[in-house]
Image (spheres, coloured by chain):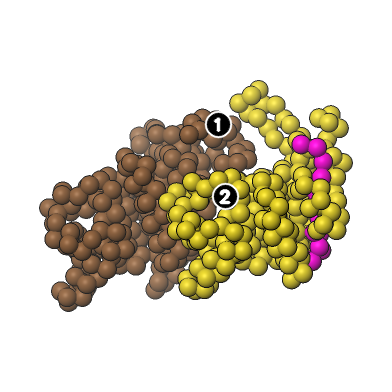
Chain colours: A brown, B yellow
Amino acid sequence: MTPLLQVEKVSKYYGRRIGCADVSFDLYPGEVMGIVGESGSGKSTLLSCLAGHLVPDSGAVRFDTRADGLRDTVTMSEPERRMLGRTDWAFVHQHARDGLRMNVSAGGNVGERLMAVNARHYGEIRDKAIDWLGRVEISDDRIDDRPTAFSGGMQQRLQIARNLVTGPRLVFMDEPTGGLDVSVQARLLDLMRGLVREMNLSAIIVTHDLAVVRLLADRLMVMKDGHMVETGLTDQVLDDPQHAYTQLLVSSVLQV
Amino acid sequence: MINVRNVTKSFTLHNQGGVEIPVVVGASFQVAAGSCVALVGASGAGKSTLMRMIYGNYLTQSGQIIVGDTDVVQAQPREILKLRRETLGYVSQFLRVVPRVSTLDVVAEPLLATGHAKAEAIAQAAALLARLNIPERLWTLSPTTFSGGEQQRVNIARGFAHSYPALLLDEPTASLDPINRATVLEMIQEAKARGAAIIGIFHDQAAREAICDHLIDVTAYAPRSAA
């Protein structure tokens, strides 16, 4: 089976400081991988390199494109990479306002992604937007409201709808449940699990919340100081951590 | 069906002075399809550890653990995930679920994951819950608020939803009343009859005698220095 994403020795330096160094892994269709580590460990830098927001200094990020199979997204042309970003990829930001247009209606936010892939029929776009708002549990009488009038949890769900409406194959998520109430978090986690299964999505989720990865991710990568220190099945890494840092991380979680 | 060959496991505690604690040394045994093996030994002898190694939850340092045609010791994460989805079921002592997901959906999940239609999966989940005497008014609630015995029965229903060819059961009858205990033993017998290979940990001796074909004393695999 061809991996959906093949990451080989990706490194990114900020001057002489390490952002992330020598990270390699394969992600297969339908797999959800979590990346954990403390702040400054390089997990967001890595995610940005994978999603094409940052250009890595070395290494390759190969994506299984629909037309030509595995292509290195680091060396492909900017228009091609942007096209991937609109079609096969989705990026869910930690702060919903980074991923939404705050002065455009909820329906417009979802519809814009569709128009970017050449949907033109107003009725169809609006129907699809209503359908997706429903899937993320936003009632259709809010379709003409702006995200500024939404709660944090609703904004996050709207951002997910906006990202998934075009049927992407790979979703990048940066702390998707950060800053949300635990009650809102639980609902969002359940929603994401359902969507991943129904759409056979692959996802890479950066978080520092071990409970979130245990529930969402099949596989886990632990980062420290820009390096990948441990990787494996999520429950195996959490229940039988091998590296000193992972053991410290797992044993530091507060019990509720 | 399950073939454990000369496996070894130790824990290294890096943050406690790098102490190395050997827990399993040279364990070897086999479980044929349609038979049930009980792991026995005192508390702390390594029964659950061995079971978790077979499930791929704990890493194994050396040896082979063949389940179906997968070597759990060498397998990639995605191969283990496939094995768990299709071949190897595990009923742990504790239920771990996403908060606020209904009991029906929790039990139906293994069926949805193997590609069954939603309606069929829900119907089968309902039948299992009814058989295990979980009152119907609780089905739409999350099992996180249930009593210990109820949670355990939900866990069992989930573990038996898909007809796994191999099953690991960690104390499946521990906190059950006599009627439910009998139901669970009956379900294990049925799984054996359809050809499942089963490894179980039962402190309940009567249960063990009723359903197990062999006993494996894991004390034999405990390292001498620690014993």
At x 81%, y 30%, the residue is B226
- Locate residue B25, reporting x and y percent: 82, 41
Determine the image quadrant of residue A130: bottom left
Q: What amino acid does circle 1 point to?
A: Ser
- The residue that mark 1 highlights is A251
Determine the image quadrant of residue A136: bottom left
Q: Residues within 10 Å of mark 2 (few under 14, many from 20)?
A: many
- The residue that mark 2 highlights is B151
At x 72%, y 66%, the residue is B191
Vertical position of residue A180 compared to residue A2: above or below: above
Q: Secondary structure at mark 2?
A: helix
Residue furthest toward the top? B17
Q: Do we see residue B214 in this rendering?
A: yes
| Magenta-colored span | B29-43
- Locate residue A123, reporting x and y percent: 17, 75
For the residues beneath circles 1 and 2, the answer to whether they share a chain is: no
Asked whether A28 or B184 is in front, the reply is: B184
Vertical position of residue A161 compared to residue B46: above or below: below
B157 sits to left or right of B65: left
Q: Chain of mark 1?
A: A
Asked whether B27 or A172 is in front, the reply is: B27
Q: What amino acid does circle 2 point to?
A: Gln
Q: Residues within 10 Å of mark 1 (few under 14, many from 20)?
A: few
| Inter-mark Cα distance, 1 to 2 | 26 Å
Q: Does the magenta segment cover residue B184?
A: no
